[in-house]
Amino acid sequence: MNLNELINIELPAEVKKYLSKYNMGLWKTELSGTKNFNNIIVIPAIHEYKNIINLLKSFAQNDNKYFNETLVIFVVNNLKSSHEDVISDNRKSLELIRDIIFKKSDGELIDKISSAGLNIGLIDASSKGLELPEKDGGVGLARKIGMDIALAHFDYSNSEKKILICLDADCTVEKNYLTAIVQAFKKRDSGAAYVQYEHLFPEDEKEKLAIICYEIFLRYYVLGLIYADSPFAFPTIGSTMICDYESYIRIGGMNKKKAAEDFYFMEKLAKITKIKKIGSTKVYPASRGSWRVPFGTGQRVNRYFAGTHDEYLLYNPKSFDVLKKWLLCFNALEILDADEYLKNAKEIDPALHSFLIENSFKESWEKIVLNSKTNEQIQKQKMIWFDGFRTLKLIHYLRDNGSPSAKMFDALDEMFAHFDKKIIRMNKEELPAFEIQQMYLAELREMT
């Protein structure tokens, strides 16, 4: 069935309304039956044939307690203009997934998936006439197609949480992955979460250093936000994102961005629900260079090898001190007028004051107060105005205006001190040995 047909079946009113508004009618789900599910994992895939095999093997080793009520949807996608190597690899992926769905062959992998009881679905956004549009085609749209169509495959007849789980085709997962996610949502009232992640170390030592460096960069920023008591202190990595269907609909679903779709998706979720950490299981993203998106793990690994940037720099810890003081002032229950906030900001740091002026804080704040009927509405608008994106913009602004980037391990030492953590470095002038870098990352993995 395509989405137009699925909309006509019995669905909750809010789901029908959403699907009618964001109609992905060109694409359809290929399934072996008409069963509906409580949990749906959506996996965009482009040129990932070998990785899909690895991921499926990983799933086959999972605790199968919730397999019967779970569907895994692969969204195999490319543009019409994609290179023939990509299209050819995608054809192999389509064939493999269809063989699994319809049990067309007796291969070992297909037997493993079938015997495990995992339900597999396919959305073909790759074959002729089904390609993603050139303008919007990318990981955001591929995720959106899968997640939107997933809404029509939930079993709304029972009271169990309906969970949308994001994953990437180049990942593997821990053996309790699905069980931990489902049980976490059963116990919590939050509508969104993220799974703990760890990049697996490649065999090559330089590649290991590249991925350690990048994961430290990612986790340090989150740790800085934790220190500053930011409501946006969580990773924004596509393969770790989870939400229930109600939250998905409330924020208008996934965006179509070709990169950073995960950042904007999680930021919107954080404005309507608490983002919880599921630390009892892990997803393992690939540690590889990649052309698939203009930034992210793949591009940072590529950049590390190109040597075009000093990769061993982090945001200055003082930036997070400024952020912490600003949030303490701005998020307090007491409502001040714009000039008072600006006066306090100038006392915290002149660069913060300049940032707020350049971002039209006074005009925005006066509109917020004028259009809000209660203090509760004003508090909510604070988070909407000073959101995750504006938080990142402030950290960048401070970096460029008085708080320059710091050496990676000096910055880590200073930040760790706020949490009573310490790692001994023998010579602080040199880049630490590989083992010491691993120790820093291990601590960050525990803390974030």
Image (cartoon, helix red, strand yellow):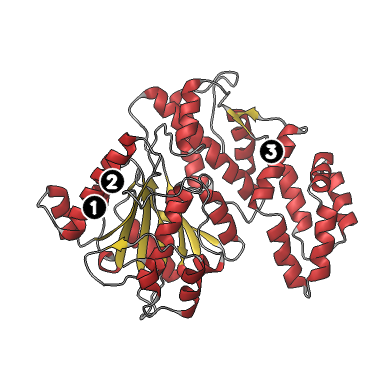
Q: Nearer the viewer, mark 3 or mark 2?
A: 2
Is 242 drawn above or below residue 246 in the view shown? above
Q: Nearer the viewer, residue 317 or 245?
A: 245
Q: Are marks 3 and 2 in contact (CB under 8 Å)?
A: no
72 sits left or right of 368 in the view: left
Is 260 drawn above or below residue 340 in the view shown? above
Q: Work out which quarter of the rendered image holds the N terminus and state it.
A: bottom left
- Give the label on residue 12, or none: none
Q: Are marks 2 and 1 in contact (CB under 8 Å)?
A: yes
- Give the label on residue 52, or none: 2
For residue 80, what is the image quadrant? top left
Q: Nearer the viewer, residue 399 or 349?
A: 399
Relative image position of residue 294 (x, y in whole percent): 51, 37
Q: Which residue is mark 3?
A: 396
Residue at the far left in the pictured view: 106
Q: Which residue is mark 1?
A: 97
The residue under label 2 is which amino acid type? Ile
Task: Check disc 1 and report its element: helix, strand or loop.
Answer: helix
Along the polypeptide, which appears first: circle 2 or circle 1?
2
Relative image position of residue 175 (x, y in whole percent): 29, 53
